Image (cartoon, helix red, strand yellow):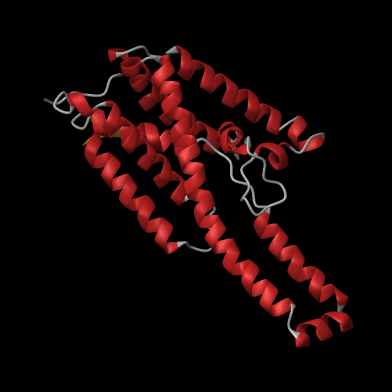
Amino acid sequence: MMNEYRPGRFQILPVVIKNLLIINVIVFLAQNTVGKRFFDMEGLFALHTFQSELFKPWQLVTHLFMHGDISHIFSNMLALWMFGAVLESYWGPKRFLTFYFVCGIGAALAHMTVLYIENQHMISVYNMVTNSEEAQQFANRYPAYGSTIREILNSRLNEATIGASGAVFGCLAAFGYLFPNTLIYLYFLIPLKAKWFVLLYAGFELTMAFQNSAGDNVAHVAHLGGALAGIIMVYFWNKKNRNTFY
């Protein structure tokens, strides 16, 4: 059975989606007003690696409400509305809210696992180099040398990650699982079944994650982590109704 995706099939703006959109917009406005002048919002609420002195446990959740620029928040909120509204109408607000945060936290943990491995290698190299006798002698002669290396390491460790993309990818994966034959219109023109859209997008993210191109500041592993968390959750929630796909 094939259906076209029409938001009107369910509630166009259910309660959780509406509130998530409002909160994200408010936080984005705060980031670009008080957050730039009076208060380091990213230092406190953006996600930081476990190895950073800036890491706080609540960042696993709060980073989901922060965004980098207009295009970042617009694309995330549009996708959240498109797929999340259907899921909330299908599951109800409580289950959807649980799903959303589990996907977001799952994405964060996947991203931080990769960061931890990469940073541990950098820390090991830093310790090996700076603790050598030659490096210490050089640092004594040129104090700025040691400071520069520490600044580079600290800059890496204190990089912030923001955005709801991980949770949104969980919603996309769940939508593709529950409504595999529903048509999604790419660029509002090209029809593609949801299952193929999800698989193609996941393949793209996996490729980009392995390439790890210089200058690419997108957390591709977080996207995949959110999608994986979403698939796992919806599989177990829908285990008794696996033949009722649309």
The image shows residue 57, relative to residue 112, as above or below, that is above
Query: Which residue is drawn at the image coordinates 21% and 32% (left, top)?
Result: 180
Q: Quadrant of the N terminus?
A: top left
Residue 115 image point, x, y percent: 55, 56
Q: Is residue 237 visible?
A: yes
Q: Quadrant of the C terminus?
A: top left
Pick the residue in front: 70 or 14. 14
Dividing the picture into quadrants, the one containing residue 45 is top right
| Residue furthest bottom as drawn | 134
Q: Is residue 54 left or right of residue 231?
A: right
Q: Is residue 83 left or right of residue 49?
A: left
How many numbered discs, if any? 0
Q: Is residue 246 visible?
A: no
Pick the residue in front: 34 or 191. 34
The image shows residue 3, relative to residue 164, as above or below, that is above
Dividing the picture into quadrants, the one containing residue 59 is top right
Residue 243 image point, x, y percent: 13, 27
Query: Which residue is drawn at the image coordinates 57% and 19% (left, top)?
Result: 22
The image shows residue 200, relative to residue 118, as above or below, that is above
